[in-house]
Every structure is written in C-alpha cells, then in structure tokens.
Image: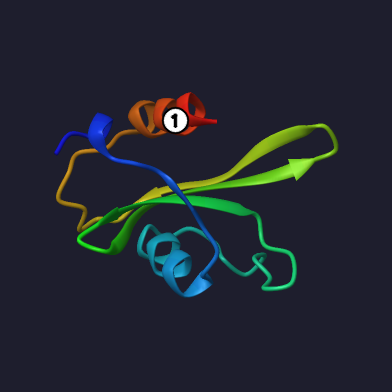
Amino acid sequence: MSARQMNIEPLSSLDEILPVLTGCNLPVADISVSSPPQFFGFRVAGSVVAVVGLEQFQSVGLLRSLAVSPGCPYRLNFDQVYRLKFDQA
C-alpha cells in the first residue's frame, strides 16, 4: 500500500493520538480533553501510525503536530501527509 492509497480520518481518542506524539518526542502537556486540537490520522492494521493535529486560531488553522510512528511499516514524509490531508479537505 502506498501513502497515496492510505486514507486519513478524523481522530477523537487521545488514547490513540498521544502514543504517536510521545513516540516522536513531541510535547503533549498542552493537549486537554476538554478542548483538544482537531486530529486526523492514518491507520495500519487498525492502529494509528500517523497523526496530523490542527488548531483553529481566529480565521486560520495552525499545524499543531505532524507525527509518523517510528514503527510505521510505510514510508511517509511530510509532503505526502500534507498533500493527503489538504487534498481531502
């Protein structure tokens, strides 16, 4: 499966999101259950392996995080993930 064939989906469970972020040594202390950023992710065999986090700031969206799990069996780079996310938006 290529990155182009993978689907990105909205994620709401911090239990799925936080392990990917912490596995990439990204900060998570600012993520609250009551007001989390909007996260999207890729799954492989049912497990989330890549996460894109966006925060709305007034009329613009800010990229909060972009993380690909070190154990992801597919090669994903920023450009591929970015294009997938914004092509589907």
- Horizontal placement of 14 versus 5: left or right? right
Quadrant where the image shows the C terminus = top right
Quadrant where the image shows the N terminus = top left
Residue positioned 67% across, 62% down in the render: 36
Q: Secondary structure at mark 1?
A: helix
Decide: few, some or many residues near mark 1? Use Cα within 10 Å; few <14, some 14-19, many ≥20. Answer: few
Residue positioned 40% across, 69% down in the render: 19
Q: Nearer the viewer, residue 89 or 64?
A: 89
- Horizontal placement of 9 versus 33: left or right? left
- Horizontal placement of 10 versus 38: left or right? left
Residue underneath mark 1: 82
Q: Amino acid at mark 1?
A: Tyr
- Tell me where residue 83 sits by quadrant: top left
Task: Name the spot of residue 30 as percent of width and height, x first.
Answer: 67, 65
Task: Name the spot of residue 68 as percent of width and height, x first.
Answer: 33, 49
Residue positioned 40% across, 43% down in the render: 8
